[in-house]
Image (tube, helix red, strand yellow):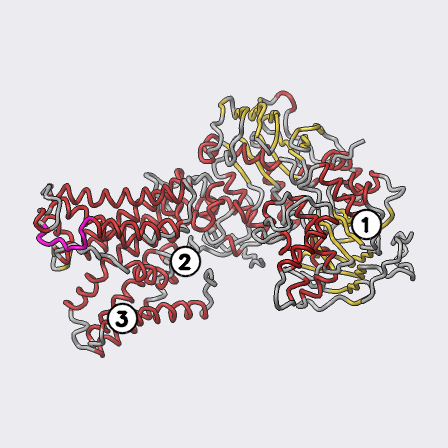
Amino acid sequence: MTVPLQTQPDSDDGTAGMGSAISRPVALGVGLSKAFGATQALRDVSLKVHPGEVRALVGRNGAGKSTLVSILTGMTQPDSGTIHFSGVAAPPAHARELWQSKVACVYQHPKLIPTLSCAENLFLCGTMSQRKLISWQKIRREAREVLDRWGLDIDAESPASTLTVGQRQLLEIARAVIQGSRFVILDEPTAKLDGREAERLFAHIRTLQSQGVGLLFISHHLDEIFEICQNVTVLRDGQKTLDRPITGLGRPELIEAMVGAARAAAAPTEQSVADGANARVRLDVRGLNCAGCFQDVSFQVRAGECVGLAGLAGSGKEAIGEVLAGLKSSNSGAIVLDEAALPGSDVARHNRAGVGFVPQDRHHDGLVLGMSIAENATMTIPDKLGSAGFISPWKQADFAQQMIGELDIKTSGPTQPVSDLSGGNQQKVVLARALARNPAALVLINPTSGVDVASKTSLFGSIRAVAQRGAAVIVISDELDELDICDRVLVIRSQRLTREFVRPWSGRDLVAEMEGVAE
Amino acid sequence: MNQSTVNAAGSRPMPRTFRFKLNSVALLPAIVVLVIVGSFANEAFLLPANLITILQQSSILALLVLAESLVLITGKFDLSLESTVGLAPMIGGWLITSTAIGGSGLMLNPYLAIGITLLVGVLIGAFNGFLIVRLGLNAFIVTLSMLILLRGITLGLSSGKTFYGLPPEFTYLGSAVWFGIPASIWICGVLFVLGSLFMRYHRFGRAIYAIGGNAEAARAAGIRVERVTLIVFVVASLLAALAGLMLSGRLGAITAQQGSNLIFTTFAAAVIGGISLNGGKGSLVGALTGVLLLGIVTNILTLSQIASFWIDATFGAIILIAQSIVRITGGERSQS
């Protein structure tokens, strides 16, 4: 394993598929494919990172970025394809230590051991683990040197938990480089950084570049990609849709590669059922604030209207939904449903007042997996299933059976545990739970995430039907498919509503607004 | 997560009357085997008097297992139950006995003392619940501390002495016989029947299962997770106080060590009976079979005149064997 330090990033744009003969790429993946069950997560993707190159990896949620990173770091075995690091074939799957010496990945949430000191994190967890005796003096001295070199003004002996996120990331990158990695993956490193910290990270990235390290840079902020990267690889639905130098690349072209040409151009085709301005306002959100989540959010939803709240992860969009559902408390502002103010931070009362809620993650707070479909679907309405708090299993099963029919849940019956269902059918049970009380307002966060196409269509139909019955529907999402069922879309960026899109809108504009690159 | 896409309309759900979960009585074959073994080991085993003895001796443990099962299904722990078994009747007894035998000399009305005994249970449970639910302390540490603290108060209050000469009203529940069967067995049986129905058919019982299964999902569905959890701690301690009252009544005395080490057997019976330490799984009927299994084993060992010193070792072995069998026959991997 030789490391070509002397080479500069060549001008190869990757589209030809053949690298320059002079510089061996620090990472070369060829024809990588991976399927999870019926889902083809990655299809014949090739990727090359040369020494001194910063390559951007871009794609929307579910495009296959995580799978690719997982394969490149040896956490997942590809179904087919090969990986070479600096011309040497990738180590076998079980050789974790060898993988760590080839490639380092820095995640949004740094994976340091928070209770150990910076010095220990730098050395003990990696290169020095082979040594039999620990020389604390030596470790501290070497750690001090590394921290100085990286411009980190921190005590080598302070525990990693006392560092800021930015400092932790730099420490992780430093550790990777100490361990000899010539290939570093940065997975959304700036998501939790402020502007100054991000600038410092970029400065270090440039230093690493000049030392011949190759980096793969993943970010949702397209600005950063134009600032720091030389080349870009775009994934969509597990396939590579673009692979070219950044220079001369227009933003529309980049977004088109991310969302698909047809999608970028086409406006949503579904017809609005809302009777425009004539329908009465059912949900009125006035000056809602939630410290650290979102600021000054006001909007109205009319009967029969379906409104999208679009934003990237971290924009604060999920928190709005959770406040509406009473799961999270707001600091100020009012939520008025059918002319009655909701009390706030009380899920049961919000539910009885008419708010149905589909939470973001069905495994985290949507379902009790060990319980039956009937129990999950009726969890919000125990009062309707009998008197004095007793639940009639007959009523429960009848209700569930009705929901199974209405939402087309594929199951052997209402008593089947939801853990036996497919993701799509599980999500339908979460929707059933939200619809159990025939809500006046239905709030859904990422209602079709991790759901197969057939279930998606069925879920969209069910959600539209709820709007048609006169409910106010709010879809909180960053998926164009999910936003397409909306009559209008409000974009939230950096905790504030920034713009409203009314039909017909273009997917390209919407994504550009969410990503914050609108011209 | 592959799912058999059975057509909902094509297959009828199982008749409701047969939907009784078989896995909740998975121990039944083992109990049958033990009964057969017992009847061969000693002809006295199957005599009604002996069977009643087994049930009566199990009734205190059964109440504690009922209490612990509620807490475990909620996904929490309560180690302090065994000390509540000691402290609650000790306070009651202290209020109704003369200074001559170490009591307070207040000579309170025994019925009032019973009420106070149960109230002590409620207060202990509320305090546990407050620390765990409101302050967010770890249930294991809180109830371990309470186990030590309450036992210490019991010892301090009694100076380590035993209270004899309790009024008959105070010992009634533990010593009375109704229709030829001790009252404690009746009470225990009724509480288990009510408890099982409540857990199966009442929204509060289902909320307990939902919280233990996924507290976040329960909260998002409008279940008041904190309140339910707190009430469960209160009910569990109340049951422990009742168990203590019955134990004192049976023995006709209150010792400072009453209930000591009972928590280990309680956990053993609950776990053997299929209550998951991860919460959300298990049934009260299953837990009761765990109690009966241990009760029968104890009885057989006693009848066979095996030194009682070996009973603990036997219990330990049974728990390990039972868990291994559950694991091998495809049960879930319990937490490490």
The image position of residue A188, as x and y in percent, is 71, 46
Q: Residues within 10 Å of mark 2 (few under 14, many from 20)?
A: many
Comparing A39 with A496, the one in front is A496
The image position of residue B317, as x and y in percent, is 35, 71
Q: Amino acid at mark 1?
A: Val
Q: Residues within 10 Å of mark 3 (few under 14, many from 20)?
A: some
**Letter of the chain that mark 3 sits on in the rendering:** B
Q: Give the image quarter of residue A308.
A: top right
Secondary structure beneath dot 3 equals helix
Frontmost of labels 3 and 2 is 3
Secondary structure beneath dot 2 equals loop
Q: Amino acid at mark 2?
A: Ser
Label placed on residue B311: 3
Give the CA separation, mark 1 to mark 3: 69 Å
Label placed on residue B276: 2
Q: Earlier in the sequence, mark 3 or mark 2?
A: 2
The image position of residue A95, as x and y in percent, is 68, 68
Frontmost of labels 2 and 1 is 1
